[in-house]
Image (spheres, rainbow, N blue to C red):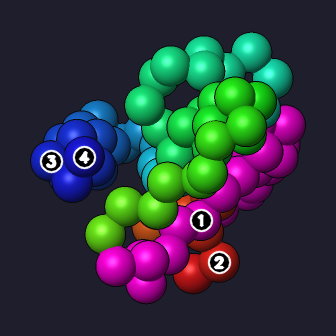
């Protein structure tokens, strides 16, 4: 991911074009596959089956989640912004 960001920034400088970099975090929403292995779909699948929710690791980890509609809005706002300095984190409070 970092290499892609570096390449797009270098290309922007070389060609003199405006670019935007958005960093997409854990996204969830309708039509998620219940067996895709991501944390939200795992929780939903386990809840539907009446199973306990599985927490991997020590339970101290944190995750940031972003609903797909909010993600799309964030991308659209980033693209429409007059100026964007640096990458924009979508789905993370920092």
Side (left or right) of 14 relative to 18: left
Compare residues 13 and 4 and report the one nearer the observer: 4
Q: Residues within 10 Å of mark 2 (few under 14, many from 20)?
A: few
Q: Marks 3 and 4: in contact by CB < 8 Å?
A: yes
Q: Earlier in the sequence, mark 4 or mark 1?
A: 4
- The residue tagged 3 is 3
Q: Point out which mark residue 93 bears.
A: 2
Q: Determine which quarter of the picture holds residue 16.
A: top left
Of labels 2 and 3, the one closer to you: 2
Is residue 56 in view?
A: yes
Side (left or right) of 56 relative to 80: left
Q: Residue at x 81, y 23 (%)?
A: 30
Q: Is residue 57 magenta?
A: no
Compare residues 12 and 94 and report the one nearer the observer: 94
Q: Residue at x 73, y 37 (%)?
A: 50
Q: Earlier in the sequence, mark 3 or mark 1?
A: 3
Side (left or right) of 38 relative to 73: left
- The residue tagged 4 is 1
Of labels 4 and 1, the one closer to you: 1
35 above or below 25? above
12 above or below 60? above
Q: Marks 2 and 1: in contact by CB < 8 Å?
A: yes
Q: Which residues are magenta?
A: 58-84
Of labels 2 and 4, the one closer to you: 2
Secondary structure category for the residue under label 4: loop
Q: Marks 3 and 2: in contact by CB < 8 Å?
A: no
Q: Residues within 10 Å of mark 1 (few under 14, many from 20)?
A: few
């Amino acid at each position: 991911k970092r290499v892609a960001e570096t390449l797009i920034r270098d290309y922007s400088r070389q060609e003199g074009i405006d670019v935007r970099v958005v960093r997409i975090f854990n996204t969830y929403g309708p039509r998620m596959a219940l067996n895709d292995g991501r944390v939200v779909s795992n929780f939903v699948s386990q809840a539907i089956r009446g199973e306990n929710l599985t927490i991997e690791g020590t339970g101290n980890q944190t995750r940031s989640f972003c609903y797909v509609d909010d993600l799309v809005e964030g991308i659209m706002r980033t693209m429409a912004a007059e100026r964007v300095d640096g990458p924009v984190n979508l789905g993370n409070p920092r």
